[in-house]
Amino acid sequence: MSARARILAALRDAHVTQPAADVPREPAAADPADPARALADFRAGVEAASGVLHVLEAGTSVAEYNRGLHASASTVCAAEGLWPVAVDAPTDLATLDVAVAHGHFGVTENGAVWVDGVAGVPRAALWLCRHLVLVVPRDSLLPDMHAAYARLGQARMPDFGAFISGPSKTADIEQCLVIGAHGPLSLDVVLTI
């Protein structure tokens, strides 16, 4: 019998007498009762993922704000269905400068935003645009991924959904961080009041 076979047989015959220990859950990143702390933690999470957080002032529309944010963009797709090009195939979005999508909620511990197929944006636009803007209601911030998955468990799951955190990043090329290698060059998260 080979050494490999002996080891595998010993593992099969081993009886674990102690139950597996529960993985301890870390405390929530922010107390939902403290909106200032939740906002500060969410900002830290978005910035740690190389994104930029903007808090929309009362009385400012998202469209007006976005025009100021990306005034030099030649092609902007808005989540309200105002698409400047016919989208028959993902390749139709190859020249898309800015995509604006509505996120359902944000996660303060890591700055992630949940976007799904109900948001009104073709899913390819989220990865083919040069700059991505996610609009999130300020009162929808959740403290951690446990709360996020609990929220998702209560809703009817769409055919598509993703947590988006920061612009596209890779460090595979000579261990040097490259932003926008296979997705958006920038991510702006806009919190609405």
Image (cartoon, rainbow, N blue to C red):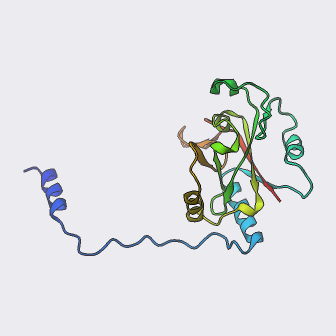
| Residue 11 location, quadrant | bottom left
Task: List x then y, in percent, for residue 131.
Answer: 74, 39
User: 189 or 47, which is in the foreground?
Assistant: 189
Task: List x then y, in percent, for residue 171.
Answer: 56, 43
Q: Is residue 143 left or right of residue 77?
A: left
| Residue 184 location, quadrant | top right
Please determine whether, in this image, residue 18 is positioned above or below residue 181.
below
The single residue placed furthest to the right in the displayed view is: 59
User: 157 or 61, which is in the foreground?
Assistant: 157
Task: List x then y, in percent, for residue 169.
Answer: 61, 43
User: 190 or 171, which is in the foreground?
Assistant: 190
Question: Image point 17% across, 60% down: which residue?
Answer: 12
User: 156 or 59, which is in the foreground?
Assistant: 156
Please determine whether, in this image, residue 184 is positioned above or below residue 9.
above
Task: List x then y, in percent, for residue 151.
Answer: 60, 61
Viewport quadrant of the C terminus: bottom right
Question: Image point 87% across, 46% down: which residue?
Answer: 65
